[in-house]
Image: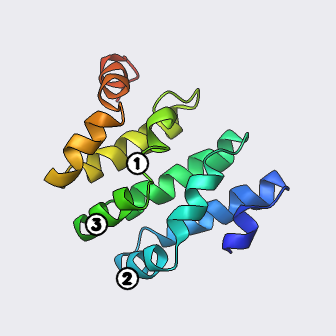
Amino acid sequence: LIKFAHSLDVEIAHQSCGVLANLAEALENQGPMIETGLLQHLKYVLRSKSVDVQREAVRAIGNLSAEYSHTAAIVAAGALLPLVPTLSSPDFLCQRYAAMGIANLATNMGNQPKIMQAGALQPIISLARRDNGD
């Protein structure tokens, strides 16, 4: 499944990342996903030119970050930095999932200075000021 996330066929990469994001919703899957190095692949896939692939990759990171016990490992794996530019994506759902992931990571006090250093505050404030119906 991870191999397909790197596919040059955008639809295959999109669907693969979507399945990974869905699997990441289940707590019992999260630990094994992180332990097998999924975050390294998701960080890479976030650089895709396809917003559909980006959206599912950032959703997967957001879902993994929902469990407090994984928040330090996610930041340690370097998955925070690629979330920050996604806050400014032209795609509203990419923005939303990135904000969700960063908010989840911020529940860990040790991550808060790293989030500030990564430059996430200003894009989050900008998102909060938007009138998007949410």
Residue 62 on image: x %, y %: 41, 54
Foreground tag (1 vs 2): 1
- The mark nearer the N terminus, 1 or 2, is 2
Residue at 20 percent across and 44 percent down: it is 112
Q: Earlier in the sequence, mark 3 or mark 1?
A: 3
Quarter of the image holding residue 29?
Answer: bottom left
Neighbour tally class for label 1: few under 14, some 14-19, many 20 plus, Cα within 10 Å: many
User: What is the total number of numbered labels drawn onto the structure image?
Assistant: 3
Q: Earlier in the sequence, mark 3 or mark 2?
A: 2
| Disc 1 secondary structure class | loop
Residue 87 falls in image quadrant: top left
- One can see residue 117 in this view: yes
| In this view, 133 is above or below 38 | above
Q: Identify the residue position indicated by label 3 in the image.
A: 67
- Please give left or right for residue 107 compared with residue 49 in the image: left
Furthest toward the right, the residue is 9
Q: Is residue 21 visible?
A: no
Which residue does the numbered mark 1 point to in the structure image?
Answer: 80
- Residue at 50%, 33% (x, y): give it: 85
Amino acid at circle 2: Glu
Residue 101: x percent and y percent? Answer: 37, 49
What residue type is disc 3 on?
Glu
Q: Residue lying farthest left?
A: 109
Q: CA distance from mark 1 to mark 2?
A: 22 Å
Rendered position, 98 above or below 129: below
Amino acid, disc 1: Leu
- Disc 3 crowd rating (10 Å Cα; few below 14, some 14-19, many 20+) is some
- Provide the residue designation for mark 2: 28
What label sits on residue 122 in the rendered view?
Answer: none
